[in-house]
Amino acid sequence: MSATWLAVILGTLGCYAFKLAGASVPESVLDRPHVSAIADALPIALLSALVVVQTFAVGMTLQLDARAAGLAAAVVALLLRAPFIVVVVVAAAVAAAVRALGWMP
Amino acid sequence: MSDEDWQRERRTVITNALSVGAATGAYGISFGAISVTGGLTLLQTQVLSALMFTGGSQFALVGVLIGGGGAASAIATSVMLGARNAFYGLRLAPILQVSGWRRAAAAQLTIDESTAMTIARDERQFAGRGARLAFWLTGISVFVFWNASTLVGAVSASAIGDPRALGLDAAIPAGFLALVWPRLKDRRSWSIALGAGLVALVLTPFLSPGIPVLATALVAVVAGVLQVRRTAGEAAT
């Protein structure tokens, strides 16, 4: 089995286990202040880290390229309360334009 | 509560469920396109939307793999992002009151959108019928739109030549930003976001791809512990 399939299958099982846990695990296990405070912070930390890595990393090197211009455009779109699809399309379009003009790799 | 009130409640729930489904559909297109241009097959992409069925985790799994991370860090990142669904399930259990195969099905539909629409209904009204209807209808509506739009995105992306020329590599971080944006509502959440971003940036040159993102889970642990301490301190004074 390829590594990608392994990730797809085990990731899926893990996500389902958490979905089922809420309905099955005794309330006392999950309903603790530390557990819920950490669970609250977890998506913010992981998603923010993914934003940074996907914008500036190429493998283990950091690089400033057209993706950063795309991200800046995404911030503007979000400040203007654009819906998800518009944010993503604007970011891609700006990155593509900056590349086509030869301003950034 | 009269029958007329229930009919009005039912119409509201149906309209909301359909509009939330249509809105997430737009975002399924980007998932399908990014996943396929990133190197996953159409089948793998579709399996994620049908069986994993939790957008943030799907994006994370694909994002880490595209970024050169190994299967282990891709799995860990996506499963940790899915941990929040356990807390949704906890909140929903007393409203849904299901067991057996219905509980298994409800678990699969326990996601951001279905939870938000369920707790938005007043569960004391109509003996919880409106809230339960909102859960099932929103869950099924999002499931159908999400899977159909994933397929549309994946199929159309197969026709794309060079994803970089179209700026699709910039669409990935923009997608993550759009996912985290609604959660950034106070100083605490902004500190977590900036702290985690900085940690990931600093660690990138030193650790294999995928690990820097995982390491920021520690930022969440620290933030959680500090939060509990502060709440305890406020309670004491």
Image: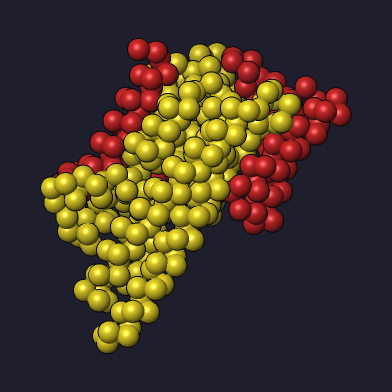
Chain colours: A red, B yellow
Q: Position of residue B15 (x, y in %)?
A: 44, 67
Residue B64 x %, y %: 50, 24
Q: Position of residue B21 (x, y in %)?
A: 46, 55
Q: Which of the two residues, A31 or A18, is positioned nearer the viewer here?
A: A18
Looking at the rendered image, the quarter that the N terminus of chain B falls into is bottom left
Name the quadrant containing residue A54: top right
Query: Residue drawn at (69%, 56%), measured in percent from left and top?
Result: A80
Residue B36 image position (x, y, % from top left): 54, 27
Is A43 positioned to the left or the right of B119 in the image?
Answer: right
Residue at 53% x, 17% y is: B68
Say how many tags the image has: 0
Is B193 above or below relative to A98?
Answer: below
Q: Is residue B79 visible?
A: no
Looking at the rendering, in which quadrant would you find the C terminus of chain B?
A: bottom left
Taking depth in this image into account, of A36 and A100 the one nearest to the observer is: A100
Quick check: A40 left or right of A69? left
Above or below for B128 versus B76: below
The quarter of the displayed image where residue B2 is located: bottom left
Outermost residue, left direction?
B100
Q: Residue at x 23, y 62 (%)?
A: B95
Report whether A16 appears left or right of B204. Answer: left
**In this rendering, does residue A89 appear at all?**
yes
Q: Of residues B144 and B128, which is closer to you in this image? A: B144
The answer to whether A30 appears left or right of B21 in the picture is left
